[in-house]
Image (cartoon, coloured by chain):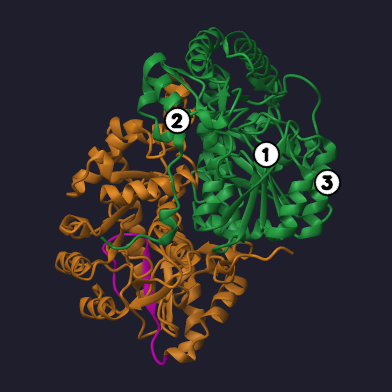
Chain colours: A orange, B green
Amino acid sequence: MSEYAERMSIAKGSPIRAMAKLMADPELISFAGGNPAPEAFPIGDLSELSKQVLLEKGARILQYGETEGLSEFKESALEHIIRPRGVKAEPGNLLTLTGSVQGFDLLSKVFIDKGDVVLAESASFMGALQAFQLMQCNLAGVEMDDEGVIIEDLEKKMAELHPKIFYCIPTFQNPTGKTLSAGRREKIAKLAAKYDVIVLEDDPYCDLRYRGSAEPPIKTFDEAGKVVFFNSFSKILAPGLRLGLVVAEEEIIMRMALCKQSAVGFPNGLAEAMADAYLRKNLLPAQIRRIVPIYGERCDAMAEGIRKYFPEGCRFVLPDGGMFIWVELPGDPEKYDMQAIQLRALQEIKVAFIPGASFSTIPGRYKNTLRLNFSAAPREKIGTGLEKLGSLLKEYTN
Amino acid sequence: MSEYAERMSIAKGSPIRAMAKLMADPELISFAGGNPAPEAFPIGDLSELSKQVLLEKGARILQYGETEGLSEFKESALEHIIRPRGVKAEPGNLLTLTGSVQGFDLLSKVFIDKGDVVLAESASFMGALQAFQLMQCNLAGVEMDDEGVIIEDLEKKMAELHPKIFYCIPTFQNPTGKTLSAGRREKIAKLAAKYDVIVLEDDPYCDLRYRGSAEPPIKTFDEAGKVVFFNSFSKILAPGLRLGLVVAEEEIIMRMALCKQSAVGFPNGLAEAMADAYLRKNLLPAQIRRIVPIYGERCDAMAEGIRKYFPEGCRFVLPDGGMFIWVELPGDPEKYDMQAIQLRALQEIKVAFIPGASFSTIPGRYKNTLRLNFSAAPREKIGTGLEKLGSLLKEYTN
């Protein structure tokens, strides 16, 4: 066999996808993935809009398009998504993405040479980090407390490791559900300037807030042009449309666009025209008002179920939004074999979750933790699933 | 500014895209890009299908999907596109692509380490090669005659340069319009086995045949599992849907899928469901019967125009299909400054074409050549444009 590239030894499949077959059981209660609730998709509106935009401008949106994104969609995204968050941006600062995961790929191509360091929160979204690892970066983790990444440790690691990029999910973090305060956000922007590090601010969950008030994006504190801001339509509209946005300095956007030419060429014109029409009809605010209570109730049901059914001594921080609750089991982390527990849960009680260690960027961490997703399962199943899972976990804590 | 990755010094924008602004003039007659005719898009069918598939299976196709592609689309693509070409494949041999350009990116990640050699025809599609160059390959060209790549030179370069990949467009080649005989195709498959080289067979134009009969894909001669076969919906349905296919050994597909996870995550469910419905309703054969005469007439009109208006001594091979005619101007190649001619054509006569040297993989080649696209301009404009362009070219040949 012709030899594979060296990077292929690094690439691992997502642990979530690897279990796809076990998880395809229709009786399974899944707290594993990060899927939106199907009832959150505005199917009626999208089906009407798909037909309408094809009839109105099919000749253009079915043709080869602009690498940077459909021009009207770029305009409406700036007006309805980016600028309302306080992020200043002109069309030259915006690139549309085939899902934000594309942004990870493009940014890693623009910045990462083999051996360059990428920092991430001590537990982070491996889907993003895998793109950086394919460009053969070295990954290092930054410590977190209950309020997210610890600024002192971030500064220490920026100074010592000279990273190219710090990857950060500031709001309802995946996997921990934690949210950074405005104060920490401002400090991150300052450190990026001081140590000349790109901050990749990945903010797909920010609209799913169930309590408290919005924090400004790190990008709003970015006087040095070091912050690259990602947003996504996957959580608020539908992942299947594959729509994301990146805002950054024009020089960075230009280079990402160059790489996009050689990655997907140009975006899906139909999906972008549909999202553009959706934004221009101002349907998004009502959509968000409709889905936030669905997810908020599920979040509360999950918190209640954990308190009620999980072993004594379990610890979690109730998230203010997003899709995940991160649970720490009591006692010595070394005593838990979470992969074995995960497999037993799948096989014996048909409940799925992800061991926290799967998200760890610091070797050996988080052996006693689980990430639980509350967005995909209906409320009543959340209780049932947590009751079963709690009983199983008690076998290990008692 | 944080330092960009080394690969960014290699990346160049497409010369076609770079002139996008000059070419946006609505009066321009463009023989430059490779756009399908807008009247070739089945807009009515696609708009009905978009609405229908969203109403029927919106909850699934708007959700996170399978990295390998929507399962029913994989089935219908095998049945209606891949197997009718004589290519044997099971679902595990197939990966769907966000346009075939995504395949270039994925394959380059799977196989190319910095410094690895990629072979291509002496004039080739730079959009593909740029993806390989982003993985820092060394590019080398293989000589061509009127029937395409010269087998003896291919063998010599495989033996001398130990390439990882030979990139080949066997049918109605871009940019030359040439088609490889079955004999040469079989030899390429044998050389791939002998020298352990991956052959990337890129076959997006094969359904656009205006004369003669179909040649079997190189993949049908691939006993050693070295051929990676690409197909695309861009030329027969619509580029804006971003749909391509790759067929290869399961081991290669698995690794490409792994890279796809970190590139776009998973495909656009709506686009794949629309194409699936289109194939299952068996609409593609009639679509191809409808568009082939449109393009065939334009091809003939262009050949006629070149004969009538271009300088004496011009040479071209009438293509049997596809979208391009490749013209060689007479005399010493060094006397032509085709970039200057291109600019004058744009500014003075509002006619666009691409200098052949832009496609060259052998330095210094093709200085006296042009690639002319005949698919995008209506028939009457082809004559007008060639008359103007012919007059301009005569200033240089006389």
| Amino acid type of the residue tagged 3 in the rendering | Lys
Chain that bears disc 2: B
* Residue drawn at (59%, 75%) of the image: A343
Mark nearer the viewer, 2 or 1:
2
First in sequence, mark 2 or 1: give its number: 1
B222 horizontally vs B345: left or right: right
Q: Quadrant of residue B295?
A: top right
Mark 2 vs mark 1, CA separation in Å: 25 Å
Q: Quadrant of residue A83?
A: top left
Question: Is A331 above or below relative to B152?
Answer: below
Q: Label 1, on which residue?
A: B169
Q: Label 3, on which residue?
A: B187
In the foreground, A151 or B188 = B188
In the foreground, A30 or B105 = B105
In the foreground, A236 or A128 = A128
| Amino acid type of the residue tagged 1 in the rendering | Ile
Kindly report the secondary structure that dominates the magenta region of the rendered protein. loop
Q: Label 2, on which residue?
A: B339
**Dividing the image into 4 quarters, which one contains the N terminus of chain B?**
bottom left
* Residue drawn at (38%, 77%) of the image: A140
Question: Is B80 above or below relative to A121?
Answer: above
Identify the element where label 3 is drawn: helix
* Disc 1 packing (10 Å; few <14; some 14–19; many ≥20): many
First in sequence, mark 1 or 3: give its number: 1
